[in-house]
Amino acid sequence: MHPFRWLVTGIFLLLPPHAWGGQAKAAPALTPADAACIELEVNGERIPDYVCMSERLTPASRKPVPEIPASEQRVRQAPTALGLAHRAATQQRMGNSFGISTRPQRPMAPPPAPPTTRP
């Protein structure tokens, strides 16, 4: 292709539409339901627009979820996030003495090192 052809095409596209000889018409506004989802093809692999597809598949009559107050969010947190002890954590801490003793299981103390003698 001739290099000047690219230049002429670029200049032509930069000109306003009324300079092309035609009337500029406003495109009708498309709602998200009317718009088509775009698919890309990269290295021969088709990549669909999942956000667009999920918006089109979502029912229009879906009610917005009310926001939960901060106090309710605090109550719904996991016990470990609140610093509370629960059975599994206590069982892990106590080891095999869970339910038997009030002292947690600890490994046996290592025997004392033999005294070193100097020659």
Image: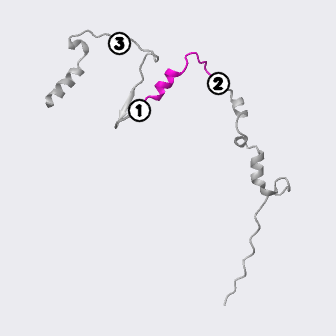
- Mark 3, residues whose alpha carbon is within 10 Å: few (<14), some, or many (≥20)? few
- For label 3, the residue is 27
Can you tell which mark lies on residue 32? none
| Three-letter amino acid code at the position of disc 3 | Ala
**Could you tell me which secondary element the residue under label 3 belongs to?**
loop
Q: Is residue 55 magenta?
A: yes
Residue corresponding to mark 2: 67
In the current view of this chain or complex, which residue is farthest to the bottom?
Answer: 119
For the C terminus, the image quarter is bottom right
Quick one: label 2 or label 1, which is nearer the N terminus? Answer: 1
Q: Marks 2 and 1, how far apart in space?
A: 34 Å
User: In which image quadrant can residue 39 be found?
Assistant: top left
Q: Residues within 10 Å of mark 1 (few under 14, many from 20)?
A: few
The kind of secondary structure element at disc 1 is strand
**Residue 49 occupies quadrant:** top left
Instruction: Say which of 8 and 57 sits in front.
Output: 57
What residue appears at the point 47 percent right and 29 percent down from the top-left corner?
50
- Residue at 50% in and 25% down: 54
| Applied colour scheme | one colour
Query: Residue 90 in the image: x percent, y percent?
Result: 77, 50
* Other residues around mark 2 within 10 Å, as few (<14) / some (14–19) / many (≥20): few
User: In this rendering, is residue 116 above or below 77?
Assistant: below
Q: Which residues are magenta?
A: 47-67
Q: Tell me which residue sits at (75%, 64%) in the image.
A: 107
Residue closest to the eye, 78 or 37: 37
Q: Mark 1 or mark 3: which is in front?
A: 1
Distance, label 2 to label 3, CA atoms, is 38 Å
Q: Residue under circle 1?
A: 47
Left or right: residue 73 versus residue 105 is left
Q: Position of residue 43 (x, y in %)?
A: 34, 38
